[in-house]
């Protein structure tokens, strides 16, 4: 998930990309758990 500007420069650093990847994984797991809670009651 690289974010590049017009000249090819990094818009966000690699640490930000790692943070966004981790957030995406967390949100996916959270939505699975919340959807399972709806089905239970």
Image: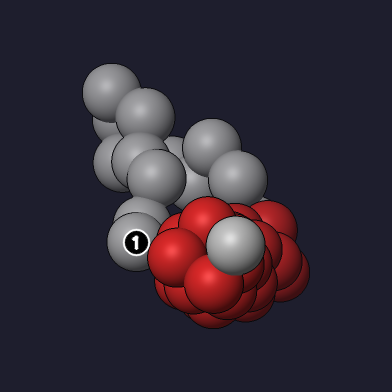
Q: Is residue 21 visible?
A: no
Q: Residues within 10 Å of mark 1 (few under 14, many from 20)?
A: few
Q: Is residue 8 visible?
A: yes
Rendered residue at 60%/45% (across/down): 12
Does residue 39 appear left or right of residue 14 in this picture? Answer: left
Looking at the rendered image, the quarter that the C terminus falls into is bottom right
> Residue 5, image x and y in percent?
37, 29
Q: Nearest the camera: 8 or 21?
A: 21
Please tell me whether residue 40 is drawn above or below residue 6 in the rendered image: below
Does residue 1 appear left or right of residue 39 in this picture? Answer: left
Q: Nearest the camera: 21 or 30?
A: 30
Looking at the rendered image, the quarter that the N terminus falls into is bottom left
Rendered residue at 54%/37% (across/down): 11
Indicate how the structure is coloured in the image.
secondary structure
**Residue, far top:** 6
Please tell me whether residue 14 is drawn above or below residue 7 in the rendered image: below
User: What is the quadrant of residue 40 in the picture?
Assistant: bottom right
Task: Give the number of callouts.
Answer: 1
Q: Nearest the camera: 21 or 11?
A: 21
Rendered residue at 45%/65% (across/down): 39
> Residue 7, image x and y in percent?
31, 30
SS of the residue under disc 1: loop
Residue to which mark 1 is pinned? 1
Does residue 40 appear left or right of residue 39 in this picture? Answer: right
Does residue 8 appear left or right of residue 15 in this picture? Answer: left
């Amino acid at each position: 998930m690289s974010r590049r500007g017009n000249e090819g420069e990094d818009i966000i650093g690699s640490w930000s990309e790692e943070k966004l990847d981790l957030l995406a994984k967390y949100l996916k797991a959270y939505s699975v758990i919340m959807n399972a809670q709806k089905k239970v009651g």
